[in-house]
Image (tube, grey):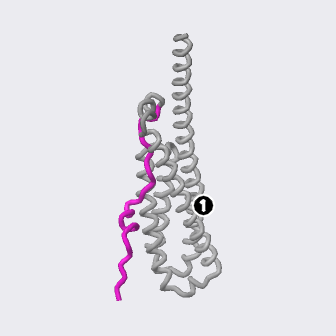
Amino acid sequence: MSTIITLVVLAAIALYVIGIYNKLVNLKNRHQNAFAQIEVQLKRRYDLIPNLVETAKGYLKHERETLEAVISARNQALAGLQAASADPTAATGIAQLAGAESALTSALGRLNVVMEAYPDLKANQNMMQVSEELTTTENRVAFARQAFNDAVTSYNSYKQQFPPVVFAGMFGHSQDATLLEFEDSAEIQAAPKVQF
């Protein structure tokens, strides 16, 4: 009788360990899929930026440096995305993407400031359409980034809990996944200052 009880206990432990393994795999796949969704939206964004620059070129002849900075930042961000896409679980690739995205956001911000000085450009139908598509894509990127960070947090939280923490390293889940954060995240989270 005691051997039957021992076998039942061992079978229950084995099933529990199998459940831990399966959940780790499931959570890892979720955060990798969430990164794939970011990748889709960022590629869309990178494809829209040359259209924006081409539309603006005719109006911004004196702002060539700004346009070149946007294209350069876009190319760096695309390279960062390709590096991160190679292994979405690698912290270095995610960090490279975050840095490149921060530079691109800054360059696009400078372009928006320059465009404000050209009312004819702002009123151009093509420019309005590309700007609207870019804004929509920015919102999609933000939602995809939030879903990715949520999936990473779920994965990291589960694998750091007991008992999964005991088995995670043995199952090939020793490294925590990296959140996609930007260099200016402290500034983004700070409350805006209003002065009169």
Viewer-proximal residue among 6 and 126: 6
Amino acid carrying label 1: it is: Arg
29 shown above or below 12:
below
Farthest residue to the front: give it: 1
Can you identify the residue that label 1 sits on?
44
Residue 28 coordinates in the image, percent (x, y): 52, 41
Q: Residue at x 41, y 59 (%)?
A: 182
176 shown above or below 109:
above
Residue 132 coordinates in the image, percent (x, y): 60, 74
57 shown above or below 32:
below
Residue 13 coordinates in the image, percent (x, y): 51, 24
State which region is magenta.
172-196
- Badge 1 element: helix
Q: Residue at x 52, y 20 (%)?
A: 9
Viewer-proximal residue among 92 and 124: 92
The quadrant of the image that shows the C terminus is: bottom left
Q: Residue at x 54, y 55 (%)?
A: 147
**Is 126 placed left or right of 17 in the picture?**
right
